[in-house]
Image (cartoon, rainbow, N blue to C red):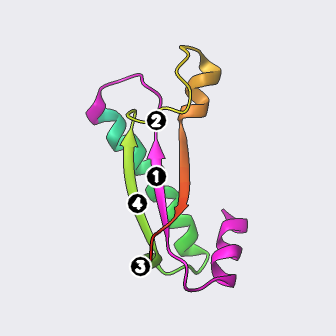
Amino acid sequence: SEAMAGFLREHPKLKIVIEGHCDDRGSAEYNLGLGDNRANQLKSELVKAGISPDRIKVISYGKENPFCSDESEQCWQQNRRDHVLLASQ
């Protein structure tokens, strides 16, 4: 997150969207909460590094957009992630 904060400091007009994702175990509601927590944790780290919170939008997709569809620990780890995108201006 420090590299991301550095990039955002160098580009002060950019805004980002942090998408929180989870593996497919557990209910949809549970995973939406986990994805929200994951994305907000990254947002908090960026804010602590000096990035204005109004530049960061958080969305949770829970288990709805998996990166990998195998039923294995390696796949589940890949699905538990934050995905950061540039926000449309």
Which residue is at the front of the view, 8 or 73?
8
Say which element carries label 1. Answer: strand
Question: Would residue 3 appear left or right of 47 to someone viewing this image?
Answer: right
Label 1 crowd bin: few (<14), some (14–19), many (20+), radius 10 Å: many
Q: Earlier in the sequence, mark 4 or mark 1?
A: 1
Determine the image quadrant of residue 72.
top right
Residue drawn at 38 percent across, 43 percent down = 61
- Residue tagged by mark 3? 54
Q: Which mark is residue 22?
A: 2
Q: Residues within 10 Å of mark 4 (few under 14, many from 20)?
A: some
Q: CA distance from mark 1 to mark 2?
A: 10 Å
Mark 3: which amino acid?
Asp
Q: Is residue 80 above or below residue 13?
A: above
What are the residue bounds of the magenta stretch?
A: 1-29
Q: Which residue is mark 4?
A: 58
Query: Picture coordinates of residue 79 (x, y %)?
Result: 54, 33
Residue labelled with disc 1: 19
Q: CA distance from mark 4 to mark 3?
A: 11 Å
Q: Are discs 1 and 2 less than 8 Å apart at CB?
A: no
For the residues labelled 3 and 2, the Cα–Cα distance comes to 25 Å
The quarter of the picture where the N terminus appears is bottom right
Spatial separation of the CA atoms under disc 4 and disc 1? 6 Å
> Relative to the observer, which residue lies in front, 15 or 89?
89
| Residue 58 falls left or right of residue 71 | left
Residue 85, image quadrant: bottom right
